[in-house]
Image: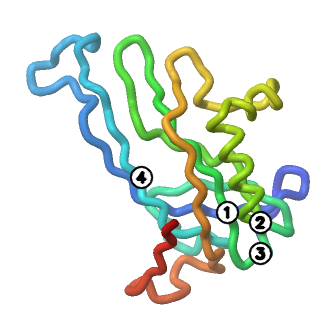
């Protein structure tokens, strides 16, 4: 178990990410006329160990020991826009919460969507609350937590739907 930061453990979220737009084009137009960039992210798996090759796209998430041992976890993932004076990027993501109980994840997601989360947590960083950033959507993803990247056969997947 990889431990750092005051007893917290690490999990590794693997995903694929593609993007379109956002470039200046062949004729190198001024930045002020740059089209928006759109990011599409497909979350794949949650791992307890990075393995040897790790994965091309992914991020470390700090969790409690209880969460690290759990067979499945619910991640609250916020989609938001980001940008600056010269352009906007849609589809950025941020893992805002990790939960063992799905109902707790849903409660946080609803608070974020309603704006209640920011009011209750004025000193917490949230990347959708800046001058050029905006909240797009909030998703709750349920992951079976795997020990290593190669565990299980990926040829058949379970998709959860409402």
Q: In this view, does 54 lie above or below 86?
A: below
Q: Distance between the residues labelled 1 and 4?
A: 17 Å
Q: Which of marks 2 and 1 is nearer the N terminus?
A: 1
Mark 1 or 4: the one toward you: 1
Q: Distance between the residues labelled 4 and 2?
A: 24 Å
Secondary structure under tag 4 reads strand
Circle 2 packing at 10 Å, graded few (<14), some (14-19), many (20+), is: few
Mark 3 or 2: the one toward you: 2
Mark 3 or 1: the one toward you: 1
Report if the CB atoms under discs 4 and 2 are less than 8 Å apart.
no
Q: Mark 4 points at which residue?
A: 41
Q: Residue at x 55, y 85 (%)?
A: 151
Observer-nearest residue: 157 or 17? 157
In the rendered structure, find residue 74 and report the number of the disc placed on it. 1
Circle 4 packing at 10 Å, graded few (<14), some (14-19), many (20+), is: some
In the rendered structure, find residue 91 and report the number of the disc placed on it. none
Q: Which of marks 3 and 2 is nearer the N terminus?
A: 3
Circle 1 packing at 10 Å, graded few (<14), some (14-19), many (20+), is: many
Q: Which of marks 4 and 2 is nearer the N terminus?
A: 4
Observer-nearest residue: 82 or 76? 76
- Residue 9 in the image: x percent, y percent? 79, 62
The image quadrant of residue 25 is top left
Q: How far apart are marks 2 and 1 (CA)?
A: 7 Å
Q: Residue at x 39, y 30 (%)?
A: 89
Q: Mark 3 points at which residue?
A: 70
Report if the CB atoms under discs 2 and 1 are less than 8 Å apart.
yes
Q: Which of marks 1 and 4 is nearer the N terminus?
A: 4
- Residue 65 in the image: x percent, y percent? 85, 67
Q: Colour scheme in the image?
A: rainbow
């Amino acid at each position: 178990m990889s431990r750092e930061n005051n007893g917290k453990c690490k999990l590794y979220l693997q995903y694929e990410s593609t993007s379109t737009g956002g470039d200046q084009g062949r004729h190198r137009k001024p930045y002020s006329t740059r089209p928006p960039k759109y990011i599409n992210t497909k979350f794949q798996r949650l791992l307890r160990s990075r393995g040897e090759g790790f994965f091309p796209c992914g991020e470390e998430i700090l969790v409690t020991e209880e969460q690290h041992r759990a067979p499945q976890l619910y991640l609250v993932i916020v989609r938001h826009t980001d940008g600056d004076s010269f352009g906007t990027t849609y589809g950025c993501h941020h893992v805002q919460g990790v939960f063992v109980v799905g109902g707790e994840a849903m409660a946080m997601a609803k608070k974020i969507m309603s704006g209640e989360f920011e009011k209750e947590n004025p000193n917490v960083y949230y990347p959708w609350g800046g001058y050029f950033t905006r909240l797009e959507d909030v998703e709750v993803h349920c992951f079976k937590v795997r020990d290593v990247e190669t565990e299980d056969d990926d040829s058949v997947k379970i998709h959860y739907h409402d």
